[in-house]
Amino acid sequence: MHRTPRARRRAAGAAAAAGVLAAAALAGCSPSSDADHVPAAVDVASASRGAVKDGGTLRWAVDDIPGTLNTFQAAADQETSQIAAATLPSLFTVDGEGRPQRDGDFLQSAKVTSTKPQKVVYQLNPKAVWSNGRPLSAADFTAQWQALSGANASFWSAHNAGYDRIASVRQGKDAHEVEVTFKEPTADWQSLFTPLYPKEVTGTPDAFNDSARDSLKVSAGPFAVQSVDTSAGTATLARDPKWWGDRAKLSHLVFTAVPAAKRAAALADGTVDVARIDTSAQSRVEGERGIRVHRTLDPSYTQLTLNGASGPLTDQRVRQAVARAIDRQAIATYVLKPAGLPASTLGNHLVLGSQYGYRDDSSAVGGTDVKSAQALLADAGWQQGHAAQATPGAKAAGPEPGKPVPSGSASASGTASASPSGSASAAPSRSAAGDDGDGTEAADATQSAGTAQAADQQAIVQPAAVRMNKAGHPLALRFVLPQDSPTLDAVGDRIAHMLAAVGVRTEIDKVSDDSFFHDHIASGDFDLALYDWPGSAYPASDARPVYGKPVPAADGSLTVRENYSRVGTDRIDQLLDQAGDELDQSRAQDLTAQADERIWAEAGSLPLYQPPQLVATRTSVANAGAFGFLTPRYQDIGFRK
C-alpha cells in the first residue's frame, strides 16, 4: 500500500483513521449532478452508543508508529494525526461530504464578527479542560499562533499557512472567549487551531520541538496517550477519566504497526480488529468468517505528474499531448471496479469527487483523443519516426489474452491496457478484449511494442515508431514509480502503453519508496511520476504551494515548494490568492474553479482517480470502517453487546 506524501493538507494534520483526512470543501459550492457515479461517502458499522459494550481493547492496524506526536512537525505522518484526533481538541470536524462542522465538545460558537479587519470570536465550551485540570483558554491559542506564525525560526514547524496571517490573539469578555484578529482576509480561518495543543507543548521552542515526540503529557480528548513503544510497534491510548463529553466506550485503543501484506493474516488470526487493506487482499479477507470489508473512495487522489522544467515536457503542447493520449476512464475502471466502487475519473485538482461542490474541469485540457495528441506532438516538432528496432530482451507487454490480472496484485505489473480509439498505424498493435466483469481489461499482447525488463527494476516501453525531432533525437520520457506499489506499477505500465500509441518511448524506473520523493520527485529527477496526494479541507490556500509558479532562487535553482511539476502561471497564483482572501464562500468557490481550469490547461499534473478505501473490521466492531472524509468519533467506537 503506497502512502501519500507528507504534504500541504492541514486538516487534522494530513490524515486520520483508515486513511481519513479531516478535509472539507468550501461551503456554498454546487454539488455534482452525476449522482449515479458517486458511491456512499461513508461505510461504517454504525451502532447506537447504547448498543456498544463498555470497555475492551480495540487493536487497529496502521502503517507505522509515529516519530512525533506533534502534527505540525515535518516528521508527522498519518498516524500522528490519527492519535491527535483522539486525544486533542478539534474545533471543527468534517462530515461525510467534506463540510466543516463545529465540535460542540470544545466550541460553543465561532463567528466572523468584523471583516475590516477580519476578526473571529471563539466561545469555548466552559467544560473543556486539559488533562491537568486547566481550562482551554486564549493562552493556548496565543502559544500555538506564535509557534506556527513563522516569526521565530527556533520553532521547528513544518508549515505556517494561515497562522502567518494573524495579527493578534487575546482573551475576550471572559475566560472562555477568544478573539483572533487577522492582518489580511483569511477565508480558511476554520482550518486553524485544529488540532489545538496545550501551551505546555507550544509555549517555548524547546517544548514544541521535543516534548511531544513520544509522549503527550497534557491532552484533552476522549483518550489520552498511555505509551508509545516503537520497538513493539504499538501506540496505546487509554480512556481519559477527565473527559467531559460522552465517555469513551473502549478502555484502550491500540494502534499496531502491521505491514499491508500481513494484514489479512492478522485479521484472520485475531491479532487486529480493524485494518485498511488493498485490493490484492480483498478476496481473501472477504472469505474470512466474522470479518466485513467496508468500502468508499479515499479522500486522496492518484495523479500523474509531468516535469515541465526540463526535456520535452517544457513544451506545453507536449504535456497536453500526453494528457490527451491517456485514457483516464480505462485506468479508473481498472483500479476501482474490482473494489466494488464506481469507476469514476477525477476531474478536479482541488476538490475531490466525493466532496460537496465537486466540478469536473478536465475539459480544459481536452478528453482522450489520440489523433489530437499526435497533432500536438507534430506541431511541437516531434514527427513520425521510422519503425523502432527490437529492444534486446524485449517481451510482450501484456498477459496472455483473456487472462486479466486484478488491480493491486503483485502480478498486475506489465499488463497492457486497451489502446484508446483513433490510434494511427504507428501505434502499438493491440485489440481490446473488453471488460470481463471484474473491472480489469484484458488485452492482446503487443505485437510491435515491447517491454524490456531488467533486474534493476528498469523497463522500456517501445512504440512501433518513436517520434523524432529535427536533430534526430527520440521522444523518450523517464517514468519514475515507487518500487513497492503493485497498483501504481500496473497503472504506470498502462500509461506507458497509451503513450506508445502516439509514438512516445517510456523508460520506466522503479525506485525504493524511501528514495522516491526525496531523491527523485523533490529534486526533479524524473519526466513522469505517479503518486497519491491527500485531499484538502481548504483548497484555495492549501493549493497555493502545490500549484504556485516556481520562483528562481539566487543560485539559479527553482524554489518549487511542493509544485513538483515545476509548472505554473501568474494568473493561477492570482486566482488562488484571491480565493484564499475571499470571505464570500460562493465567490471563493468560483475563483477556485477558475484556477483549476487553468491548472488543467497547463497540464503539469493529471488527476486520475480517487483510490479505493477498503477497511476490514471484525463484525463485532461498532462505529468503525471506511470513513472517507468523515471525522471519526473515537468515543463511540467499540464492540457490540
Image (cartoon, rainbow, N blue to C red):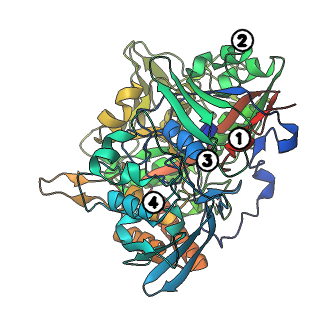
Closer to the N terminus: mark 1 or mark 2? Answer: 1
Q: Amino acid at mark 3?
A: Pro
Closer to the N terminus: mark 4 or mark 2? Answer: 2
Of badges 4 and 2, nearer the viewer stands: 2
Write down the quadrant of residue 627 in the picture.
top right
Q: Amino acid at mark 1?
A: Ala
Mark 1 highlights which residue? Answer: 248
Mark 4 highlights which residue? Answer: 543
Q: Is residue 407 above or below residue 219?
A: above
Q: x%, y% of residue 147? A: 33, 57
Other-residue count near label 1 (Cα within 10 Å), few / some / many at <14 / 14–19 / ≥20: many
Q: Nearer the viewer, residue 270 or 288?
A: 270
Q: Tell me the distance, in whole angstroms, between the alpha carbons under discs 1 and 2.
A: 26 Å
Q: Tell me the distance, in whole angstroms, between the alpha carbons under discs 4 and 2.
A: 43 Å
Q: Is residue 169 above or below residue 556?
A: below
Of badges 1 and 4, nearer the viewer stands: 1
Mark 2 highlights which residue? Answer: 269
Residue at (44, 31) in percent of width and height: 481
Left or right of 640, for residue 582: left
Q: x%, y% of residue 558? A: 23, 53
Q: Is residue 282 above or below residue 68?
A: above
Q: Amino acid at mark 4?
A: Ala
Q: Secondary structure at mark 3?
A: loop
Of badges 3 and 2, nearer the viewer stands: 2
Q: x%, y% of residue 174? A: 52, 75
Q: Tell me the distance, in whole angstroms, between the alpha carbons under discs 1 and 3.
A: 26 Å
Q: Amino acid at mark 2?
A: Asp
